[in-house]
Amino acid sequence: LSEGLSASQVEEIDISHCRITAAGMTHIAEGVRQSARLGLLMADGNNIQPQGARALYKAVASVVTDERVIEVSTQDCNVGVSDGRGFDRTEPGGQYNLDMEAPIERAIFVDLLRLVREGKGVFLSFPEPTLDEEMDGNPEPYWVEAPEGDNEDEWDVPKRGIMEFHFGSRRVAEEAKEVVPMSDMEMLVSVLKDKDKNERERVNAIRSFCEGDRLLYFDQVLEIFEIVKSDKPTGALTSSSGDLSKSDETNPSTPGSESAGTPGISKKRPLFRKDRRVERVELVRQCFLRVVESERAPELLDFLSHQERILVGKKLGVIAVSFTKNNPTGSYRLDLSQKPQRDVCSRLVELQNYQLKAIEVLKAYYTNRAGGARPSIEWGWKNATLDGEKFEFTPEWQGPKQGIL
């Protein structure tokens, strides 16, 4: 495969779920480095580990120019946090091993510094962070300075060496300041309205827009949805702020079009065509667990056709569809190999981090009371297991990409 890439004019290749190992990806990376026209490489579902991912992204970085871009996907490849595509700032806790000479990995370190500045994370002092600046196998202790000031160019970021450290997440439930800015909304809207963009580009724009720890107001989702609905709708989308469509036509006879008892939602559902179905399904799938008014997330399903709701339901799963942050109490069985269920896990982590603060206050209170410290109070997660083994949540825990929680 490596030799074939070097000698061919192939522009796109999909090697997902081919049991490729780290060693195999190292050979493929050399082919990517020598390829003349490759623009898309799909490698999802291969156990390439951080070593294989590092080799691949270094190869990509060596050939990318202003005129040439190579898109790479390595989802569910056990790449951990040693490359840009494996890093998720919504799950930053865990152990890191970063090559500070690689731009992508240095960018991860800078993003972690941003999380520290935002109060959403901390570099753990134990085990002690180290930096092998000469890359000779003799790392030295390294104290990570908390960033000061808004000028990121003045932050202390090593330019070379292998840095190892543990990072703890302090992210709690959503705050208004995390809602996506209007400038990014306008950028997404422009892409979705651009007739020169193909379906894959528009779907990728939706995914990029919803990445990280971004949240959206319900009305923002409807504003985006207005663009990807039918070209000739027979009804209008309505939000709490009013009609989002210029069309006044309705279709009173459409079965199941009413959303009784739902304030701010039109009782007339648009009659959709199939032209932008993929985008509508992807938009609802991405935004379902990111709506600030979480109790209104199920209303997004009311703006889909019956078949589209079935597709969203399959992609999200029963657990994600039924989950609400306002009332998370219950028993969970999460398959962490499924992205929607990992999203539910992320929301539960936020709630658990919030509860940990209250637990620490109670522990400090009872320590000075008669009888001394009380047994550990199990607020939040109780009786947790991971793959059948007892599991105790800690802030530095990074949700794995597989296993049953």
Image: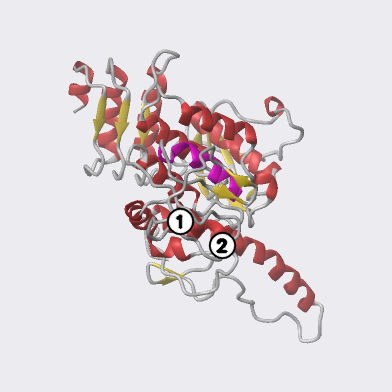
On the image, the x and y values in percent for residue 64 come to 41, 18
Which residue is rendered at x = 34% and y = 55% of the image? 306
Name of the residue lying farthest toward the bottom: 371
Q: Amino acid at mark 2?
A: Thr
The answer to whether residue 227 is magenta is: yes
Circle 1 residue = 302
- Residue 401 visible in image: no
Of the two numbered discs 1 and 2 on the same chain, state the one appearing first in sequence: 2
Give 368 or 83, whichever is nearer the viewer: 83
Helix or strand or loop: what does disc 2 sit on?
loop
Q: Quadrant of the N terminus?
A: top left
Range covered by the magenta-colored residues: 217-230
Q: Amino acid at mark 1?
A: Asp
Disc 1 and disc 2 in contact, CB within 8 angstroms: yes
**Image height of 224 relative to 321, above or below:** above
Q: Main secondary structure of the magenta part?
A: helix
User: Viewed as shown, does residue 206 lie left or right of 403?
Assistant: right
